[in-house]
């Protein structure tokens, strides 16, 4: 019999996690405080699995129907959690709510279970500190849409047990995600720290009128983005010279001089500049077309994920 994973909260991220765990062969139980949401989530999951199968981007070795069979809905939290080796909490990002949910989970946890939160910003120390089983709690932060963007940030609290980090990483690898493990809890984890550093510089160049909003986005999507879809900044340095030491010898001084001219963080995203960017998007992506554009983005991310899998299989 397949091992069981429990999903608490069946909104957008809970649904994606369910599909990811089912693709890895886990039996998945979903719970939500809202009974109707559970059946809605099961329908949406089934539809998405069949759509992805038709589109050729279904993950895992079994069919959409077989994967859907592995997923069940529950209206009772204890029933959902019973017998699970791993819990993935996916309730809204509100500190009091996460604290309450983890308090409820505390009495159901054993010394071998892992209780992971999908939290984007809150670290375990912010919602798990008063739990008896706080050593079993970790953040496993996905990136939207996690079915096509595999990174998962594993973030320990000060008291998280080492085997919790190891088990979480192993489960993520088993289901085809790409986990990274932070050694300690820091604000923004890793992805947002790096993302905010990029936005800081984009915002400053916009404010200084050096680049238009359209050209700023082109730097990423037609410049750094394609490269970074396959290799990271450190490997880029290694490949762009005869190894990283040679890169530093050749380029470190130049890079340092450029960095001396960067605006010192933090930068406030002011509404005046935001209004100018909004104006640039008024014809291309007006506010009422954002859902269509999100779908357009997700279709392209699905195609990229398929391409990367094909490249890696060679
Ligand atoms: P959502 O609003 O789509 O879904 C939340 C679900 O939790 C709802 O179905 C709601 O009924 C349920 N819920 C509320 N209180 C509950 C309780 N006490 N017990 C059980 N279920 C409860 O939210 P979403 O977007 O799925 O986000 C969930 C978590 O994932 C948040 O921590 C968020 O920061 C994180 N996350 C979200 C991403 C995104 O792009 N949406 C990306 C990465 C992480």
Image (cartoon, rainbow, N blue to C red):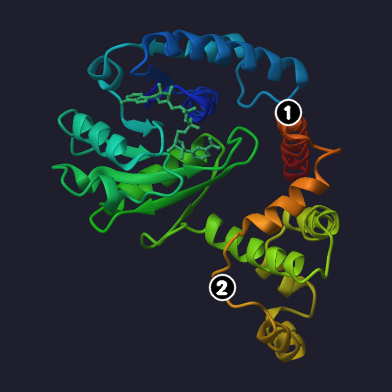
Which SS class for mark 2?
A: loop
Q: Relative to the observer, which residue lies in front, 233 or 98?
A: 98
* View extreme (front): residue: 272
Q: Residue at x 76, y 52 (%)?
A: 277
Residue at which label 1 appears: 288
Cα separation between marks 2 and 1: 33 Å
Give percent across and percent down for residue 205: 75, 69
Q: Residue at x 50, y 30 (%)?
A: 13
Classed neighbour count for the residue bearing mark 1: other residues with Cα under 10 Å, few (<14), some (14–19), many (≥20): few
Classed neighbour count for the residue bearing mark 2: other residues with Cα under 10 Å, few (<14), some (14–19), many (≥20): few
In the rendered view, would you say 39 is above or below 238? above
Q: Quadrant of the N terminus?
A: top left
Q: Quadrant of the C terminus?
A: top right
In the rendered view, would you say 294 is above or below 206? above
Q: Is residue 82 left or right of residue 45?
A: left
Q: Quadrant of residue 132?
A: top left
Q: Residue at x 46, y 8 (%)?
A: 39
Residue at which label 2 appears: 265
Mark 1 near ligand 1 (CB under 8 Å)?
no
Residue 128 appears in the picture as rendered: yes
Looking at the rendering, the quadrant in which ligand 1 lies is: top left
């Amino acid at each position: 019999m397949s091992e069981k994973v429990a999903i608490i909260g069946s909104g957008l991220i809970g649904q994606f996690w369910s599909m990811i765990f089912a693709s890895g062969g886990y039996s998945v139980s979903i719970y939500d405080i809202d009974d109707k949401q559970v059946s809605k989530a099961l329908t949406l999951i089934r539809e998405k699995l069949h759509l992805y199968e038709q589109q050729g981007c279904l993950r895992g070795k079994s069919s959409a129907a077989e994967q859907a069979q592995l997923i069940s809905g529950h209206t009772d939290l204890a029933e959902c959690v019973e017998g699970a080796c791993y819990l993935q909490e996916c309730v809204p990002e509100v500190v009091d709510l996460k604290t309450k949910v983890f308090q409820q989970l505390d009495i159901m946890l054993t010394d071998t279970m892992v209780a992971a939160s999908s939290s984007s910003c809150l670290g375990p120390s912010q919602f798990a500190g008063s739990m008896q089983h706080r050593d079993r709690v970790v953040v496993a932060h996905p990136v939207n849409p996690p079915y096509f963007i595999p990174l998962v940030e594993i973030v320990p609290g000060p008291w998280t047990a080492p085997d919790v980090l190891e088990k979480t990483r192993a489960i993520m690898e088993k289901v085809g995600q790409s986990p990274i493990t932070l050694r300690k809890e820091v604000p923004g984890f890793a992805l947002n720290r790096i993302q905010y550093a990029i936005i800081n510089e984009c915002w400053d160049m916009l404010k200084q009128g050096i680049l238009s909003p359209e050209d700023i986005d082109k730097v990423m999507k037609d410049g750094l983005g394609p490269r970074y879809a396959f290799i990271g900044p450190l490997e880029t340095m290694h490949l762009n010279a005869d190894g990283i030491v040679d890169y530093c010898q050749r380029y470190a001084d130049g890079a340092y001089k450029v960095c001396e001219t960067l605006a010192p963080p933090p930068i406030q995203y002011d509404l005046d500049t935001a209004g100018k960017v909004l104006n640039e998007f008024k014809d291309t992506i007006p506010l009422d077309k954002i859902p269509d554009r999100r779908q357009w983005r997700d279709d392209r991310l699905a195609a990229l994920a398929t391409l990367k899998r094909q490249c890696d299989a060679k």
